[in-house]
Image (cartoon, helix red, strand yellow):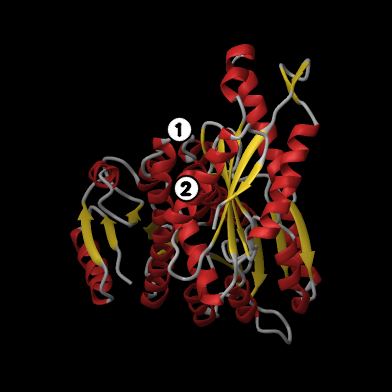
Amino acid sequence: MTARVLVVDDVPANVRLLEARLSAEYFDVITAMSGQEALTICERAECDLVLLDVMMPDMDGFEVCRLLKTSPATHHIPVVMVTALDQPSDKVRGLEAGADDFLTKPIPEVALIARVRSLARLKMVTDELRMRAVTSREIGIESPEREAVADTGRGGRVLIVDDRPASYERIAAALAVEHTVEIESDPSEALFRAADGNYDLVIVSLGLQNFDALRLCSQIRSLDRIRNVPILAITEPDNNARMVRGLEIGVNDYLMRPIDKNELLARARSQVRKRRYTERLRDNVQISIEMAITDALTGLFNRRYMENHLATLIEQAGARGKPLSLLVLDIDYFKSINDSYGHDAGDDVLRDFALRIKRSIRGIDLACRCGGEEFVIVMPETDMAVAAMVAERLRRRIAAEPFAISQGQRSVPVTLSIGISALRGQADNAASLLKRADQALYRAKRDGRNRVVPDAA
């Protein structure tokens, strides 16, 4: 893995030292000698991670970090503050400014590289989600960037995994002022608890008795349901090797004992904010995917999805030697509904029509709106005879109950015509299947509507 790291320091010797360390691990390194230069580089999206010195003449590192983390364009860039300041209050100030970590000089090289690798890896995941979410903005879905900047990181659900009462009681008491906290003192149950709890953060003590805490962290990362939940590890000061190993397997952050309450709160807020931001990105991506393949009015799949997926269903049916049938449905005299009652009434009918289709088919069937008042239902593992029975049952249900319009104040009778075709061997394809069903639908309309007509073999 490689990443572009921005080293910000006004002392050339410090810059050269960090540049040499990072370059030896195959990171691309760029440098800035001032806070303003660093802000410009970040705004141009020229780096993946920032190593930021605190003591600089024009603008100190705290202010640079605050500006980066309050800008929608740069808040997602990880920032590691590097300084000779070693007071707990300095560390908390940096974390509250938005820093992802606060490393005190002299920095152990192994710890530095592990932290940079961990944050760069997480940045790659975030970048992929942000790239996919670009299309969400283009189709009108609100970007989560401003919400992320405004998020305080409070009000999260936190699970503490620790088997020492004196330890977990202190941690829980400190976090309870800002979060909902639950405790799991049995490490063997922690994975199941985490999977079922919808947590924003899991805090794991690396000093669990008779249980490998790093294995638990690895298991959390291996489960799809919780692999994106942040993990904050609690470790002893002399346990750097396990801390580094934890970062390598996916631990997001760590805290050394003895635990400073303010640092604990600051690190928890940071991880909860990141969790919420990435979840918003994933939600946006999911919404954009759904909008790309579904019809906005009815919630059914759209024509583009149907055409792409139909070919796959036909291929599967041919490979397995299974039947497949296709229904083309058209609402009779739909134009007259729009003309007589208005397009809002027509939309009411279409939405209700889609609901009735969903209730009449199986989970494996594919229902689509192809445009206007025309719909398609693809029925895998269904021959012509069974498809005709389903179509006739659906036709009767539509005709039997009028459709409510004008917010339920009026109703209108609706009927539909259906054409059916069935797969004819492995040489058949989607285009011919649709064409035959369309021809059958035309005959249904020609012969008086409100009827089901199978394809003439």
Q: Amino acid at mark 1?
A: Gly
Query: Where does the N terminus fall, quadrant-wise?
Result: bottom left
| Label whose residue precedes the other's in the sequence (1 or 2) | 2
Disc on res. 140? 1
Q: Is residue 8 left or right of residue 89?
A: left
Q: Secondary structure at mark 1?
A: loop
- Within 10 Å of disc 2 (Cα), the crowding (few <14, some 14-19, many 20+) is many
- Whether residue 341 is situated above or below residue 328 in the rendered picture: above
- Whether residue 385 is situated above or below residue 37 in the rendered picture: below
- Whether residue 348 is situated above or below residue 224 in the rendered picture: above
Could you tell me which residue is drawn at 50 percent across and 82 percent down?
A: 241
From the top left corner, tell me how far across and down residue 111 is, in percent: 42, 73
Could you tell me which residue is drawn at 74 percent across and 60 percent down?
A: 197
Q: Secondary structure at mark 2?
A: loop
Q: Is residue 126 left or right of residue 237?
A: left
Disc on res. 98? 2
Is residue 70 visible in the rendered structure shown here? no
Q: Nearer the viewer, residue 205 or 422?
A: 422
